[in-house]
């Protein structure tokens, strides 16, 4: 019998997974396959498209077949070489690990940079790191849009970082709302619309305005499928307002975010504010006209992004 090369099982799994991924993501992205001879740990470079037009927002994909994975509890574990992880961390664009279940037409995804940020530095001494891919980060091959959290991570890395103390230049409310749409978020309606309006209101007037009832200590809590809002009382007046955007959870304190987009969800124009301080997990703004301190933040690991309004700590 003539000697011929063989295709291994792992090669077959990898090719099938890559083909299925490409066929799905090409609907939303310009998908560029990295040739095998140039593959150092990235299978695809993708650019998000808006209709027929490119956005310039890029991300990388490493694709694995589910047959290569191990399911442990609520996650799928993939061993990745430390050299590959370091290569991902060098990239200017975010790199995602996607596990493809070709049999069931399912995709599971993870942003390894978040997980690596939770580890101590000892992982650099290992040969491989087991990267968990949460089973809750799942989408089917007939999706109509890219996963909201994935897009928000891409947008976070693509957004420009303003300098401390600067006003946000020519950014308009329309720009902020467009950025929110890029995150998969939409402008909230009453009672979550422009929540700073409740600052200084009497508890009775605030309760009437938001359609809620004060609890025993006078605080008012309002919920929807998109937001959780707290109006905190001091005496008979609202002294603090906090609103959580549920669809941004779970976020990571080590993951950057575009606070202008988050303010856009609340119909707040960032150009009217001063960005005073910026940390990865907390952006501090001042509204000098209303004399308010506004904090856009991830309060703890896995929390949603939230916006807090206070007059007490203005300029503090």
Image: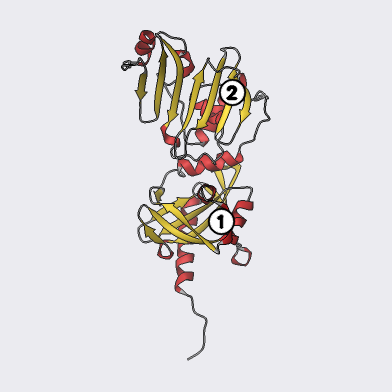
Closer to us: 310 or 222: 310
The answer to which quarter of the image holds residue 282 is: top right
Spatial CA span between label 2 and label 1:
37 Å
Pair 2/1: label in front: 1
Q: Position of residue 117 (x, y in %)?
A: 54, 47
Q: Can you identify the residue that label 2 sits on?
A: 285
- Residue 41 seen anywhere in this rendered image of the structure: no
Closer to us: 146 or 271: 271
Helix, strand or loop at label 1? It is helix
Residue drawn at x 42%, y 44% is 144
Which of the image's four quarters has the C terminus? top right
Which is more N-terminal, label 1 or label 2? Answer: 1
Please count the marks in the image.
2
Neighbour tally class for label 2: few under 14, some 14-19, many 20 plus, Cα within 10 Å: many
- Up/down of 155 relative to 38, above or below: above
Q: Can you identify the residue that label 1 sits on?
A: 122
Residue drawn at x 60%, y 52% is 89
The answer to which quarter of the image holds residue 275 is: top right
Q: Position of residue 222 (x, y in %)?
A: 36, 22
- Up/down of 230 relative to 245, above or below: above
Specify whether 231 is left or right of 28: left
Q: Position of residue 13 (x, y in %)?
A: 45, 67
Q: Position of residue 151 (x, y in %)?
A: 51, 42
- Residue 95 seen anywhere in this rendered image of the structure: yes
Residue at the farthest bottom position: 1
């Amino acid at each position: 019998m003539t000697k011929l090369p063989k295709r291994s099982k792992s090669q077959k799994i990898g090719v099938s997974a890559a083909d299925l991924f490409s066929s799905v993501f090409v609907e939303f992205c310009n998908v560029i396959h990295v040739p095998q001879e140039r593959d150092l740990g990235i299978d695809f470079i993708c650019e998000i498209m808006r209709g027929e037009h490119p956005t310039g927002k890029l991300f990388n994909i490493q694709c694995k077949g589910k047959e290569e994975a191990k399911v442990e509890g609520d996650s799928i574990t993939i061993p990745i070489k430390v050299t590959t992880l370091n290569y991902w961390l060098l990239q200017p664009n975010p790199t995602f690990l996607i596990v493809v279940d070709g049999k069931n037409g399912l995709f599971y995804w993870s942003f390894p940079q978040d997980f690596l940020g939770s580890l101590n530095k000892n992982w650099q001494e290992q040969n491989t790191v087991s990267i968990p891919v949460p089973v809750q980060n799942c989408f089917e091959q007939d999706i109509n849009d890219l996963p909201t959290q994935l897009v928000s991570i891409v947008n976070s890395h693509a957004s420009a970082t303003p300098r401390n103390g600067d006003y946000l230049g020519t950014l308009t409310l329309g720009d902020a709302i467009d950025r929110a749409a890029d995150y998969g978020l939409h402008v909230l309606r009453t009672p979550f619309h422009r929540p700073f309006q409740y600052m200084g209101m009497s508890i009775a007037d605030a309760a009437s305005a938001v359609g809620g009832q004060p609890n025993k200590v006078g605080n008012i809590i309002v919920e929807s499928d998109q937001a959780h809002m707290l109006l905190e009382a001091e005496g008979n007046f609202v002294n603090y307002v906090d609103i959580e955007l549920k669809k941004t959870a779970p976020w990571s304190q080590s993951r950057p975010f575009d606070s202008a987009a988050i303010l856009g969800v609340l119909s707040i124009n960032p150009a009217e504010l001063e960005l005073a301080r910026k940390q990865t997990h907390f952006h501090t703004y001042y509204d000098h006209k209303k004399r308010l301190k506004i904090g856009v933040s991830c309060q703890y690991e896995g929390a949603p992004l939230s916006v807090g309004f206070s007059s007490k700590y203005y300029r503090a």
